Image (tube, rainbow, N blue to C red):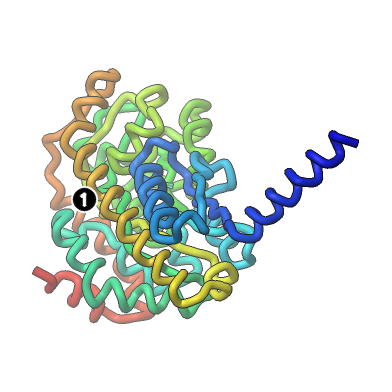
């Protein structure tokens, strides 16, 4: 009898708490300590603070809930709350986003952040919001570089015959076909195993991801090609978001800003320290790369994927941002 009473009181307390609290799961594909993980933690901390604990949060890191395409689909059907994802698979849902994945488009980090934080970034978030998704803010993955297990890559000729994993992104696949590699699209959670088993020879990702995923365990060479800037975005399920009050929505936007700030600071840190880490872990880093021939080939094949449908206006506008 005594036990029964204690049990009943405890159950009431838990029920009360459950009604007041909502736990938000932030899913992504890289490890919990990565640039996305740091961003997710900052988002969660800010959301908890602004809501006075009404919202709590946790990460579902390292692709435990699926690859980025699966995660985006999950947002649309409401099985996933929130996602931090690269734009890699997003063009499959919102084709206008392909503009951001064009190779050799952004000059540097300042240029990319200025575009994404400005009018163009807002316009593209509006497009995302028209497609059964809610974009909160642009975050960052970083400039991508080619790694492989076979040989140092310095010129497009060195890519010939290399089986290279790309994201599930038509622009990237076209770019690598143009540069002479054999692109193999694959979801990120499968990449480490595919490299390990030799299903593919190489892959391309920013220093952020190469270090977080310890690709040095399965790759010998990294060429600092910086062939494409990889944006990331913080997305929330429209099913979750539509159920929030305006005040609560405001907390999510505010918390997303804190997430982006922490994420970009971590990208900056890894841009400064990451290459040394790759060397320390035995990778041969190829830095003497003439990007011009890569750019010429990539642009020839990749830009038309976007311009055939939408014309060159957006590209010109992005390039014009100082
Ligand atoms: O967003 O798929 C990729 O290569 C991405 O860069 C990775 O999932 C992080």
Q: Nearer the viewer, residue 321 or 237?
A: 237
Pick the quarter of the image with the C terminus: bottom left
In the image: residue 83, left or right of residue 311 = right
Write the residue at 34% across / 53% down.
Answer: 259
Above-or-below relation of 127 to 305? below
Above-or-below relation of 198 to 256? above
Q: Secondary structure at mark 1?
A: helix
Tell me where residue 22 sits by quadrant: bottom right
Q: Position of residue 240 (x, y in %)?
A: 57, 67
* Disc 1 residue crowd, few under 14, some 14–19, many 20+, Cα 10 Å: many
Q: Nearer the viewer, residue 223 or 65?
A: 65
In the image: residue 314, left or right of residue 322 = right
Tell me where residue 260 sits by quadrant: bottom left
Q: Position of residue 285 (x, y in %)?
A: 21, 28
Does the image show residue 303? yes
Q: Position of residue 89 (x, y in %)?
A: 46, 59
Does the image show residue 161? no
Q: Nearer the viewer, residue 245 or 264?
A: 245
Number of labels in the image equals: 1
- Residue with the most extreme right position: 1
Write the residue at 20% across / 39% down.
Answer: 269
- Name the residue that disc number 1 marks: 294
Write the residue at 42% across / 57% down.
Answer: 47
């Amino acid at each position: 009898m005594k036990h029964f009473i204690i049990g009943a009181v405890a159950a009431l307390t838990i029920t009360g708490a459950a009604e007041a609290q909502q736990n938000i799961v932030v899913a992504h594909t890289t490890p919990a300590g990565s640039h996305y993980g740091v961003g997710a933690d900052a988002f969660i901390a800010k959301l908890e603070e602004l809501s006075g604990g009404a919202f709590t949060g946790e990460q579902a890191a390292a692709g435990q809930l699926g690859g980025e395409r699966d995660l985006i689909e999950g947002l649309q059907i409401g099985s996933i709350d929130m996602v931090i994802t690269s734009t890699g698979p997003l063009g499959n849902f919102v084709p206008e986003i392909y503009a951001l994945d064009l190779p050799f488009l952004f000059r540097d980090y300042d240029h990319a952040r200025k575009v994404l934080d400005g009018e163009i970034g807002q316009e593209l978030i509006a497009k995302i919001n028209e497609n059964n998704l809610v974009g909160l803010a642009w975050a960052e993955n970083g400039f991508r570089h080619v790694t492989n297990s076979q040989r140092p890559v310095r010129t497009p000729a060195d890519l010939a015959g290399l089986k290279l994993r790309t994201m599930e992104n038509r622009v990237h696949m076209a770019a690598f076909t143009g540069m002479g590699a054999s692109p193999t699209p694959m979801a990120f959670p499968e990449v480490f195993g595919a490299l390990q088993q030799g299903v593919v020879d190489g892959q391309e990702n920013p220093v952020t991801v190469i270090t977080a995923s310890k690709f040095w365990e399965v790759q010998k060479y990294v060429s600092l090609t910086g062939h494409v800037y990889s944006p990331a975005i913080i997305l929330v399920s429209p099913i979750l978001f539509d159920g929030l009050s305006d005040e609560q929505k405001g907390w999510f936007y505010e918390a997303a800003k804190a997430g982006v700030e922490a994420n970009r600071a971590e990208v900056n840190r890894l841009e400064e320290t990451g290459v040394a880490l790759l060397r320390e872990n035995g990778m041969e880093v190829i830095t003497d790369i003439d990007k011009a021939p890569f750019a010429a080939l990539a642009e020839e094949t990749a830009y038309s994927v976007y311009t055939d449908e939408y014309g060159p206006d957006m590209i010109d506008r992005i390039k014009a941002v100082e």
